[in-house]
Image (cartoon, rainbow, N blue to C red):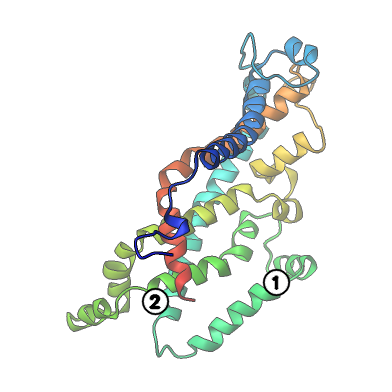
Amino acid sequence: MTASARPRWREKPRPITQVGKVLALATVVLLVCVPFLVIVSTSLASTDEVVENGGWVLWPTEPTLDAYRDILDGGIVTHALGVSTGVTVVGTLLSLACTVTLAYALSRPGVLGGKPVLLLILFTFLFPPGMIPSFLLVKELGLLDSYASLVLPVLVNVFNLVVLRGFFQGIPEELYEAARLDGAGDWRVLWSVVLPLSKAALAVVGLFYAVSYWNSWFYASLYLESDHWPLQQVLRTYVVAGSGLTDATTGEATVTAPQTVQMAVLVIATVPILLVYPFLQKYFTKGVLTGAIKS
């Protein structure tokens, strides 16, 4: 290769390569968007149209909100939505607080017992507890049928802890020393120096926690009674078990087609995360990659 020649990876792509990339990207977009469009369209379709199209509608001719009215008037989905929102908000805040403080302590050199604690945490990541020990522990702590059972057993995620610890270690040591010279203690350094510089990592970890709490249904099926279920467990009941909705006063089944009810619940369960994700997407690359450099 001559001195003026550029490396192959820096050469301008050939037209056929560009066309291939466009086709591949378009295929991925269609595979993602078309199913979501079908879900939304089916939830907005009328009962007759759903029946005529065999249960699925690509584009409703007469959009209606009957399915959404049915599931919201029944009270079950409304209550489950409130449960999921509360568990997600409270759980995310508690998990962030515990993960940040623990990651900061483990990131500082010379902390008493820092390495044994880190090894113990990594051990739980490699060998997680099984379902039966977790259930027995929750039962012995008196957390059955309480919302705390959805938060406390999963309060700190090891992966998120390692990401934040690596990010804190990547902050220049001179900033810590300057804060110490100004008389700042550990809490002051964490609040005034570390957290303002860690917004990207905190946004990523916070979204990871929020998505985990919002999508959690397995622990709810183990620890909670049906009248305390979050939205995802109710969604599973509608979609997997095929249960329909009943009127809250008469106890009779609604006239809405089961598919429209299922898809409407699915839309309600999906939209909140879709609305939050675009605002935090820009932090993903910086937060995850920077935090993963050191561990």
Q: Which residue is mark 2?
A: 169
For the residues labelled 2 and 1, the Cα–Cα distance comes to: 26 Å
Q: Which of 276/152 is in front?
A: 276
| Residue in view at x 53 percent, y 52 percent | 210
| Residue in view at x 73 percent, y 56 percent | 223
Of badges 2 and 1, nearer the viewer stands 2
Q: Which residue is mark 1?
A: 128
Residue 146, image quadrant: bottom right
Name the element at disc 2. Answer: helix
Q: Which of 50/254 is in front?
A: 50
Label 2: how many Cα within 10 Å (few below 14, some 14–19, many 20+): some
On the picture, is 51 further left or further right than 234? right
Can you name the residue that lies furthest to the front here? 2
| Residue in view at x 78 percent, y 21 percent | 55
Picture coordinates of residue 214, whole percent (x, y): 59, 48
Dot label at residue 289: none
| Residue in view at x 49 percent, y 76 percent | 295
Residue 100, image quadrant: bottom left
Q: Which of 3/246 is in front?
A: 3
On the picture, is 246 further left or further right than 200? right
Q: Amino acid at mark 2?
A: Gln
On the picture, is 91 further left or further right than 255? left
Picture coordinates of residue 24, whole percent (x, y): 60, 39
Label 1: how many Cα within 10 Å (few below 14, some 14–19, many 20+): few
Rendered position, 111 above or below 129: below
Rendered position, 175 above or below 21: below
Q: Is residue 37 visible?
A: yes
Q: Amino acid at mark 1?
A: Pro
Rendered position, 113 above or below 164: below
